[in-house]
Structure formats: structure tokens, C-alpha cells
Amino acid sequence: MPRIVVFGNSGSGKSTLAKELAATHSCPHLDLDTVAWDETNSNPPTRKSLASSMEQLKPFLMENSQWVVEGCYADLLGAIIPSSTEIIFLNPGVATCQENCRDRPWEPHKYDSPEAQNANLSMLMTWIEQYSQREDEFSLAAHEALFQAYTGFKREFTSNARH
């Protein structure tokens, strides 16, 4: 019964890998973006409280014996990882993450239109570039700490080639 957590920087390939793993294991996939953000269209976007996000996560985790969860939120991931059978840290570097974001198709669950997604690209490039300098739940340091503390089966990939 796989319960896999995939995490890393924006653009690291989390969604792509998580969807592949969910299809391979015929299990549900959850993108933490869907529970982490306030649904009002505030600008800039506002995170929900950790407690509110966890309340939304509980049914998914309780109703499914196997799953793939992906995201960049170390606070949410830290609550899920103890239930996982495997974690995968995608850490391909800033240049690869930025290239992936430039090449990604439209994400209709996040943006109203391809134009809206493209309008956010400049901010996203800066965000990705700051990964190693940030000291928050989205940072390289937070992701490395999750990875180091996990005692189960874990893998880190430092490129898009995961063979």
C-alpha cells in the first residue's frame, strides 16, 4: 500500500511525478495547493491556517489507504509524512525549476487562463531563485530537514532524469 509524499521547490517536477506515481499505483493524488490557499481571490494570495488546511486533509487521508501527496509546504508535509511509506525530495536546482516553469502547460486548477499563468511567471522565477535563501516552510532548508529526519524509505533526485 503506497503512501508517497513528493516535495521540492516550485517547478521541481512534483506534479508530473506525483501524477505518474498515482497512475502507476492506481491511487488518488492530492496536490497540497488545493488545501493550502484561501479560495478568495486575494492579491497577493493568502495561506489558510495550518489547522484549516489539516481539516481539509483529514478526509482524504482517512478515506484512502494508499495515495500520492505532493507539495512544497513543509508544515503540512510534516503532518503527513509520518503516515507515508516513502518520501521523494525533488531537488534539481534553480535553473531546472525555472526552465520547468517556463515550459509547463496551463494549470487550470490554479489560474483562470494561460495568460493569467504567464503574468505570474516573473514573480515565480524570483520565488524559485530565492529557494536556498528563504527561511520559511517553502525553503530548501525546511525540505532538507524533512528529508533528513525521515527514517523510512526515501529518495532525493537532483535532476529531471529519475532512472
Image: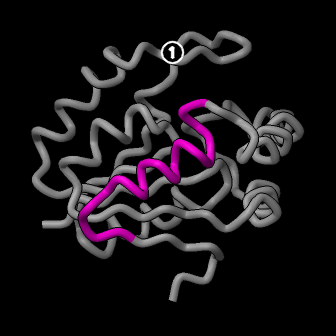
Where residue 97 sits in the image (x, y, percent)? 73, 59
Quadrant into which the N terminus falls:
bottom left
Q: Is residue 138 above or below residue 56?
A: below
139 sits left or right of 36 in the view: right
Name the secondary structure under disc 1. Answer: loop
Under mark 1, the amino acid is Asp
User: From which residue to which does the magenta span run?
Assistant: 136-154
Residue at the (56%, 53%) spot, across then down:
8
In-front residue for pair 132/90: 132
Q: 10 left or right of 120?
A: left
In the rendered picture of this protein, how many numbered marks are placed on residues?
Answer: 1
Looking at the picture, the colour scheme in use is one colour
Residue at horizontal 54%, vertical 33%? Answer: 137
- Residue lying farthest to the bottom in this orientation: 163
Q: Is residue 125 above or below residue 20?
A: above
Asked if the stretch drawn in magenta spans residue 138, the answer is yes
**In x, y percent, where is residue 71?**
48, 45
Q: Nearer the viewer, residue 141 or 57?
A: 141
Q: Does the stretch in magenta take in 36?
A: no
Question: Which residue is disc 1 drawn over?
Answer: 38
Near-viewer residue (91 or 124)? 91
Position of residue 93 measured from the top left corner of the image (x, y, whole percent): 73, 64
